[in-house]
Image (cartoon, rainbow, N blue to C red):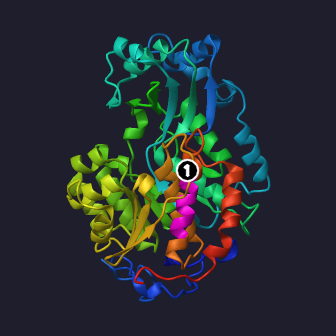
Amino acid sequence: MALSLLSPVPPAASLSSSSSSLSPLYSLYHLKGSSRTSSTSIFGGFRSSWNLRIDSKAEKKQLGLMVSTNGGGEELDDMDEGQIDSIGGHDEDDEEWTQGHASSSSSSPERWDVLGLGQAMVDFSGVVDDEFLKKLDLEKGTRKLINHEERGRVLQAMDGCSYKAAAGGSLSNTLVALARLGCPSFTDRPLNVAMAGSIAGDPLGSFYRTKLRRANVNFLSAPIMDGTTGTVIVLTTPDAQRTMLAYQGTSSVVNYDSCLASLISKTNVFVVEGYLFELPDTIKTITKACEEAHRNGALVAVTASDVSCIERHYDDFWDIVGNYADIIFANSDEARAFCHFSAEESPISATRYLSHFVPFVSVTDGINGSYIGTKGEAIYIPPSPCVPVDTCGAGDAYASGILYGILRGVTDLKGMGELAATIAATVVGQQGTRLRVQDAVDLARSHDFRLNSVGTDVGS
């Protein structure tokens, strides 16, 4: 099935059908790749927050067994998913979401609405002071790769601090928000959302998979039995600066195999997380995955993820974006980096430029708003008002709104952007990176009349 950008999500029984209803905007774009034969498709022929609070020393001692490098291996193997989940108690959001999907089938659907390929890492987030960073010789506000031993030392040093563990990651934030927007309390059927990547056959890997499953996001990749699940330690100082220490573990190994190929062949929208470009040998995996997606009529979306990542892997990014991407998500700095534009260039210029190469371009610009670009033109989306609490995860939330609009068959691109902006503002106005369940339901309901209306297209 060649999925159109503006073709509504078909009912579950018809997901395998080769036909789809057409919309007035189908003539705007063409799908990339010679295998796309439909001339009516819009893309046809165109070139934190599942929280686990860990406050007591007893809890940290238990967690220390999981990260210790001296004598901790046996305890790590002995711990199960339930023991990890019990650290800090059950999450209220977990309960609400699980109840909301109690009737959902545990079997796999015929097709996945969205499959994301990204880094699967457990976040450990805590608040520390500047002295803590000095003691560990850490430069504030930076992101650094660390090894297994360094991870253990940092977590041991955090004893006495209040911190939490979460199934983290930019891509997982987007996928959870998307699943919540498409929950069955509002739509005919829930959106079928899944993620692939690399986790180990350890308790942290089980924790990651379980937390996503409770959010109705299925983590489909088999665990690597002899590995260690990747983690990111996020240290926030009182001035709100974040210092990030990433232990990649098994997340640095993302292989293309028959299992991933099979999943992609049953996917409508395939999303590639930009952070994967940092990993050795993943370009081959990404290329093969994108080729398989286009071969089976799926749209390919790429998240820019990080300016420095684009700069370090510029050619690799453009090999994928220029040849396979139907959708790209970036902020204004990342969009300029893609275009080799200076900081003085406007985001709308970068959006227009990118839209000559990618059929659908989404560029966010913080408090200044955002842009949707197609065929060399751009629509400005004003920011949604909010009282900012935490800007982390805003771009991930915005992307979920765009994907939701695409899957709902939106013909009003401005309305789609306004929904995305409202979702982002909702996340910015709360503590944490995940869109809450009730907020998602309310947002989907309040914007339904706009998503089903016909508005002006990008050319006007």
Query: Residue at image x 64%, y 14%?
Result: 56
- Residue 290 in picture, x, y percent from top left: 37, 64
Asked whether 255 or 407 is in front, the reply is 407
Disc 1 element: loop
Task: Mark yes or no: residue 403 visible.
Answer: no
Which residue has dot 1 on it? 220
Residue 410 place in picture, x, y as percent: 56, 76
- Residue under the point 43% across and 44% down: 119
Residue 424 in which image quadrant: bottom right
Principal secondary structure, stretch drawn in magenta = helix
Please tell me how many numbered marks the rendered image carries.
Answer: 1
**Apparent side of residue 183 relative to residue 23 in the rendered image (left or right):** right
Q: Residue at x 57, y 30 (%)?
A: 165
Region of the chain picked out in magenta, as a range = 416-425
Magenta stretch containing residue 424, yes or no? yes
Q: Is residue 265 above or below residue 21?
A: above
